[in-house]
Image: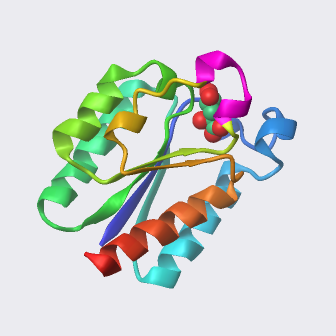
């Protein structure tokens, strides 16, 4: 089965973007961590980043087609600031029925109050928040365990 790891706006800047908040690892490093985690569990990986909401929607729809075919383990989505604004992303998750792990590198609840609300949490199976970039590997481990338990 396949895991989609989708990254939204500004995550291409990881490594140089507010390192005190997001750490020193680059998005390429995160991609390698995800590849290692998927390899541990025999899962295939699709790893993407876009600054465009519609492109993220298209990838969720693609994941949804794999889900319908029984070939998807789940979607790990760090939607960045779209987390706090995007009804469209929430509708896509609900409409496709994909298993979602919502992910945030930082602990959004320890930050500004506008980061405390997420449109995605209500349609997520789980939320991974505040574990730094290690959270990506943990989220993939969790999806693999859910597969094993299913
Ligand atoms: C983020 C948290 C969001 O509030 C922010 O807009 C981001 C990154 C995180 O990974 O901690 O872009 O999703």
- Say whether residue 96 is left or right of residue 39: left
Q: Position of residue 85 (x, y in %)?
A: 45, 18
Q: Residue at x 51, y 23 (%)?
A: 117
- Residue, far right: 20
| Residue 109 in magenta stretch | yes
Colouring: rainbow
Closer-to-camera residue (98/26): 98
Q: Is residue 10 visible?
A: no
The spot of residue 125 in percent (x, y) is: 36, 51
Indicate yes or no whether the magenta region holds residue 130: no
Q: Can residue 113 be seen here? A: yes
Which quadrant contains ligand 1?
top right
Name above or below for residue 6 compared with residue 139: above
Q: Which SS does the magenta portion mostly show?
A: helix
Residue at horizontal 68%, vertical 46%? Answer: 130
Quadrant where the N terminus lies? bottom left
The magenta-colored residue range is: 108-115
């Amino acid at each position: 089965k396949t895991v989609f790891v989708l990254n939204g706006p500004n995550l291409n800047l990881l490594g140089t973007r507010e390192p005190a908040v997001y750490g020193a690892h680059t998005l390429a490093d995160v991609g390698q961590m995800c590849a290692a985690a998927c390899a541990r569990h025999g899962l295939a990986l699709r790893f993407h980043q876009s600054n465009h909401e519609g492109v993220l929607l298209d990838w969720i729809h693609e994941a949804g087609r794999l889900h319908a075919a029984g070939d998807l383990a789940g979607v790990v989505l760090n939607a960045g600031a779209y987390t706090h604004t995007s009804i469209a992303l929430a509708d896509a998750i609900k409409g496709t029925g994909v298993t979602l792990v919502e992910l945030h590198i930082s602990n959004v609840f320890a930050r500004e109050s506008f980061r405390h609300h997420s449109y995605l949490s209500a349609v997520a199976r789980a939320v991974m928040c505040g574990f730094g970039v290690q959270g990506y590997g943990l989220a993939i481990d969790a999806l693999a365990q859910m597969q094993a338990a299913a």
